[in-house]
Image (cartoon, helix red, strand yellow):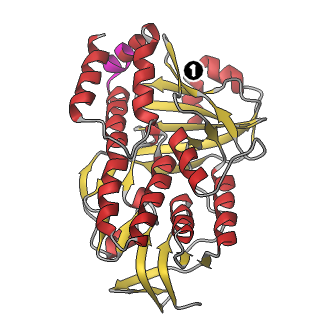
Amino acid sequence: MANSSEVLVIGAGPAGIASAIAARLKGLEVTIADARRPPIHKACGEGLLPEGVSALRRLGIEFTSDVAHPFTGLCFRDHAASAFAHFPNAPAFGVRRTTLNQILLERAENLGVKFLWGARLTSLSIGSARLNDELFHFRWLVGADGYNSQVRKLAGLDSFQWYKSSRFGFRRHFRIAPWSDFVEVYWGDGFQVFVTPTGREEVCVSLFTSHPRFRLSQGIASFPALASMLRHATPADAELGSVTSLRNSRRAARGRIALVGDASCSVDGIAGQGLSLAFQQALSLADALSAADLASYAAAHHQITENARRMTGLLLVMSRSGWIRRKILRLFSSRPEVFSRMIALHTGPQSGQALGARAVIQLTFQMLGG
């Protein structure tokens, strides 16, 4: 095992590999360590919003129809109403998580990023980490090791600004041609079913729910039209589950250590923004590492995540309250310009001017008063 690197990244998921690519593009020497070995799976909705696509382009990654499927907006449905909104700054893509990981991995390898597979982080000290009981020296450490980050814990960053109760996520792929150019979101009582096109002959169906015993098949069966579409579709893999929540670390960086992706801030799967936020964070972190100024990354991280956290909070309110959800979905159906405004705020640039609390309150009153 090599025993030093300018930048050591813990975690070889999309956030970690994207951070490594961005740092290499700044000329930094980078090593990624992960206790797992590829392919690395994780249950997610597999939709990549326009800002995430734009961030990947800056990392030198372009999607083709062979590996990803474009979609143009979002459709919200319940049993009585439907609402549609196009993204103002398309394109967006559905892409399998394992496919995305492989694309990122190949890009990183081509740029000279080194990988240590099966390397488990056991301890941290100033300028060094212990991986499988061997000392590894670094100038900068990046924690990209997910929701239950060991880096965050060992670095003393394991406290949160606020916390919402966790929910449960499940996903499965089905062999069927996508029937819509939208990601469809079906709203039930305390759960949502997402249908994301991920290929010419494939869709990803995911469930996010607050009910611990509720499963994907029950969510699909709750919507007869969706169940009918999938009745003759062949499952392409087994159902995979994970935990999803809305929470944010008090500090995204301290000393020589920075957090990215779910290690720093997780947004409930209802938002569909986890990957897009991680890729934007990776770019900002690389700028900070190049300038040897992690304080600038902490400020950028706050800007990148602020809108997403606030808008996710609004979506979770819709999930918890049937009355609010029904009222808002009927407003979206009758006044599509309001839905379009919300989607533009939700999926637009996250690193510019943050959506202020007053704007959120105004939008909420408009929706509830509509």
Q: Is residue 325 magenta?
A: yes
Please give left or right for residue 210 compared with residue 102 in the image: left
Please give left or right for residue 254 compared with residue 11 in the image: left
Q: Nearer the viewer, residue 196 or 276?
A: 276
Instruction: Evaluate whether residue 152 shows in this view.
Output: yes
Q: Nearer the viewer, residue 29 or 169?
A: 29
Q: Quadrant of residue 306?
A: top left
Q: Residue at x 64, y 60 (%)?
A: 104
The residue wearing badge 1 is: 223
Q: Is residue 346 magenta?
A: no
Q: Residue at x 63, y 57 (%)?
A: 60
Q: Residues within 10 Å of mark 1 (few under 14, many from 20)?
A: some
Residue 147 image position (x, y, % from top left): 42, 59
Amino acid found under the numbered disc labelled 1: Phe
> What stretch of residues is rendered in magenta?
321-327
As drawn, 92 above or below 132? above
Please give left or right for residue 325 compared with residue 53 in the image: left
The dominant secondary structure in magenta is helix
Q: Quadrant of residue 102?
A: bottom right
As drawn, 56 above or below 112? above
As drawn, 258 above or below 193? below
Q: Residue at x 55, y 61 (%)?
A: 18
As drawn, 264 above or below 319? below
Quarter of the figure that contains the C terminus? top left
- Report the number of discs: 1
Q: Residue at x 42, y 38 (%)?
A: 211
